[in-house]
């Protein structure tokens, strides 16, 4: 482990969530912007996307395009999103329908190139932590393969305690470092006992709450970046391992 990371090619961080649609993309963009504001160069990656538009250039996913645009260093789309699947369904089903094999080695090569080009590569998952990618492997297996530290986005709503704690248990069982978690409020009206839910997670998740994001009618990168302000992201990300150790 290094105390901090200051040279390009140092590694990455994986953003997972308690479910699909909980704010992973926006938290990833906000985290990238917060790091950029602290003079880090950052790139984004969406290794597997399911839910793409057909364009003359090929299949394009909205999350991947946002991550590509937020990067400090321009990157080809195919590197940001090596596996793009058209229907918005579970990736292993979309892949089987398209006759695509989700190839971890190809994803790892793309990740290495991205990570070598900037201080940090922020990698967004697809769906939640144990979403299958093929008949044998899940998103969690991919994160293990890339040996990435994890940030968990929790949508603060009824049911989130179970989802969050199950996810944390699985991350721990795989001996991956949990950098921290982010509480995200997705709805204009706070969930009943939202503060008590956040407290319950503070008491049970053995990693810091890095940010609390309030509801916004129009999500912007600045809104999510502000949620990290005043935080020493550098300190949170001290878990990021050098590239040569992070990719086996
Ligand atoms: N704090 C928030 N306030 C309002 N809307 C939000 C907030 N966080 C996320 N959303 C909205 O919820 C939806 C899911 O967010 P997204 O980041 O795409 O989730 P995921 O990447 O986990 O699928 C998007 O429409 C986004 O605009
Ligand atoms: Mg997303």
Image: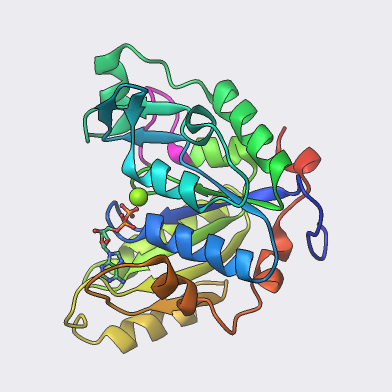
Image quadrant containing the N terminus: bottom right
Tell me: 125 left or right of 247: left
Tell me: 18 left or right of 149: left
Residue at x-position 32% and y-position 88%: 196
Position of 26 relative to 142 (above/below):
below
State which quadrant residue 212 falls in.
bottom left
50 or 217, which lies in front?
A: 217
Residue 201 screen position, x and y as percent: 42, 77
Residue 42 screen position, x and y as percent: 62, 53
Image quadrant containing the C terminus: top right
- Asked if residue 168 shows in the view, the reply is no
168 or 155, which lies in front?
A: 155
Q: Which quarter holds ligand 1?
A: bottom left
Report the magenta residues as a range. Answer: 131-139
Position of 97 relative to 245 (above/below):
above
Residue at x-position 64% and y-position 49%: 12
28 or 78, which lies in front?
A: 78
Residue 195 screen position, x and y as percent: 32, 88
């Amino acid at each position: 482990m290094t105390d901090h990371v200051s040279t390009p090619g140092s590694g990455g961080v994986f953003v997972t969530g308690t479910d699909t649609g909980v704010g992973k993309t926006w938290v990833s963009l906000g985290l990238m912007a917060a790091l950029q504001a602290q003079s880090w160069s950052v790139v984004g990656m969406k290794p597997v996307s399911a839910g793409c538009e057909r364009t003359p250039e090929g299949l394009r996913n909205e999350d991947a395009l946002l991550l590509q645009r937020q990067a400090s260093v321009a990157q080809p789309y195919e590197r940001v999103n090596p596996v793009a699947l058209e229907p918005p369904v579970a990736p292993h089903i979309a892949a089987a329908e398209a006759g695509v094999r989700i190839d971890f080695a190809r994803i790892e090569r793309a990740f290495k190139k991205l990570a070598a080009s900037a201080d940090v590569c922020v990698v967004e998952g697809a769906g939640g932590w144990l979403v299958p990618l093929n008949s044998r492997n899940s998103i969690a297996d991919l994160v293990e393969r890339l040996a990435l530290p994890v940030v968990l986005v929790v949508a603060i709503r009824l049911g989130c305690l179970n989802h969050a704690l199950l996810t944390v248990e699985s991350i721990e069982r795989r001996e991956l470092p949990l950098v921290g978690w982010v509480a995200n409020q997705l709805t204009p009206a706070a969930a009943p006992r939202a503060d008590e839910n956040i407290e319950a997670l503070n008491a049970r998740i053995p990693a810091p709450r890095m940010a609390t994001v309030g509801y916004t009618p129009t999500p912007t990168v600045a809104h999510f970046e502000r949620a990290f302000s005043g935080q020493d992201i550098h300190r949170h990300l001290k878990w990021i391992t050098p590239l040569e150790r992070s990719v086996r």
